[in-house]
Amino acid sequence: MLPDDERALFRMLARRGLTLYPELVPPGFTPIPVDEHAVERLETPSWYVAAERLGPVIVHPIKRGPDKGLLAIEEIPSPVLHYERSVPNEKGELLGGRIWAELDVTDDPTDRKGKPRALRAIFDEISAFFRKGWRRSEPKGHWVGPKAAAAWKRGELVLREAGHKGRAFGVWR
């Protein structure tokens, strides 16, 4: 997704009262509210989208290594979705991003320690948003935002899977 596609996604999510945390949180960090103006404030490619009204975001300090002193978010007990942005690589190709969450923490339906149902509803709303107005990739596996699909169709943009040997993909139809 291009920044305009990302703004549209954040505009849709703004009414949910969500916040953004970087993958590694500096102490004293103030979360960024999810709205269309948040795109300009995102420096790193990996973020957590937090639904803090459903529960606290649980962090623990990193005690060793190059990231010592930063805080890491615990994904399982926290009501968060992991969000990897679509960013251009060194060749100017747009790498595919993703949104995912571990929503089914346990196989036991009587165990109530899993994620809140409202977090699944947010994830389902994002999926419906993509199905409604975004294009499928060819081969399958990605949703392509309307602005990115138009740029690809005009030949101005190359879409590529993330990873060391990510293959190029196009837009279906």
Image (spheres, helix red, strand yellow):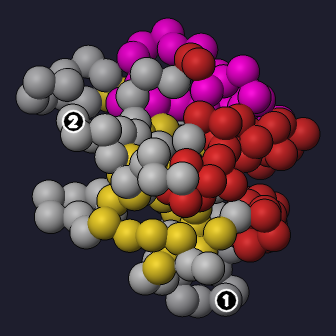
Residue extending farthest to the left is 65
- Confirm whether residue 44 shows in the render: yes
The kind of residue on which mark 2 rests is: Glu
Mark number, residue 90? 2
Q: For numbered disc 2, what is the local secondary structure? A: loop
* Magenta-highlighted residues: 17-39
Q: Amino acid at mark 1?
A: Pro
Relative to 34, residue 31 above or below: above
Q: In the rendering, at what x and y percent does residue 21 appear?
A: 53, 31
Which quadrant would residue 17 be assigned to in this image? Answer: top right
Question: Residue 143 appears at what percent x and percent y?
Answer: 58, 67
* Numbered disc 1: secondary structure: loop
Residue drawn at point x = 65 percent, y = 69 percent: 135
Residue 9 lies left or right of residue 80; in this view the side is right
**Where is mark 1, residue-wise?**
109
Residue sitting at x 43%, y 22%: 43
